[in-house]
Amino acid sequence: YQTFVSAKIDSQLLDPLLEKKLEDALRVDTPSATEQLDVEIKKGGKDEALRIAQSISKQKDLYTDSDAQNNIVKAFINAGAMKRALNHSQFLVNSQPENVAFHELRAATLAKYDNFYQSKQSWNRVLQLTEDPEQRAKACFFKSFNDYENRDYKSSATEYTRCQKVTA
């Protein structure tokens, strides 16, 4: 009886340990996955970058990592997955509305797909959120550049003039 109870206790102790080891083995290693994504983007491996981006885009521990999120969206863009890039950048802005880096990423993604008006609105949001002079100058410049790309040269010149006031 004692051997049976002892074996039962041992198996109860081992099961959680085995489950933990199994979970660890199956879990994507976030740092190496994000590093691999960066490598794939740099070497132009679109398919592999897209595969990695898809696998790590929903990992909650990366939601605040703006570098990882930037690479995820970049991988979507490089692979021609426009809808995924737009949806993911919108998800980031919705989940962290005060995160300046995510608004910049959203604005750049919108501009990449010629959504200049919405991109300009995202750059406006950056101006509202930050007091950092470099970020403000960048946002102001890209607001003006969006108008230029949209062939609204008068508005582009007006925005550029405003930039001098914003960055002064």
Image (cartoon, rainbow, N blue to C red):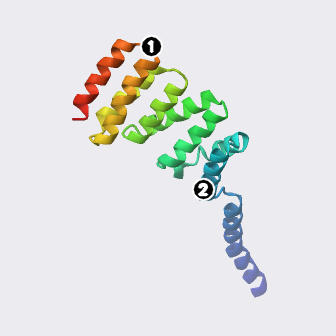
Q: Is mark 1 on a helix, strand or loop?
A: loop
| Closer to us: 2 or 126 | 126
Query: Label 2 crowding class (10 Å Cα cut-off): few <14, some 14-19, many 20+?
Result: some
| 12, above or below 143, in the image | below
In the image, taking residue 41 as reference, residue 153 lies left or right, namely: left
As drawn, is 95 to the left or to the right of 43?
Answer: left
Q: Considering the image in quadrants, where does the C terminus appear? A: top left
> Any mark on residue 151, and which?
1
Q: Residues within 10 Å of mark 1 (few under 14, many from 20)?
A: few
Q: Is residue 39 above or below residue 90?
A: below
Residue drawn at point x = 72 percent, y = 44 percent: 48
Q: What residue type is labelled 1?
A: Arg
- Residue at the image position 48 percent from the left and 31 percent from the top: 108
Q: In this view, does 102 lie to the left or right of 55?
A: left
Which corner quadrant holds the N terminus?
A: bottom right
Q: Position of residue 85 (x, y in %)?
A: 58, 32
For residue 58, side relative to residue 43 (left or right): left
Q: 59 above or below 18?
A: above
Q: Position of residue 11 (x, y in %)?
A: 73, 75
Q: Which mark lies nearer to you, 2 or 1?
A: 1
Q: As shown in the figure, which amino acid type bears the numbered disc 2?
A: Thr
Asked if residue 130 shows in the view, the reply is yes
**Quadrant of the rendered structure where residue 147 is?**
top left
The residue where tag 2 is placed is: 30
Q: Where is residue 117 in the image (x, y as percent from the top left)?
A: 43, 19
The number of discs equals 2
Viewer can see residue 117: no
Q: Tell me where residue 119 sits by quadrant.
A: top left
Element on which disc 2 rests: helix
Horizontal and vertical percent for residue 70? 52, 42
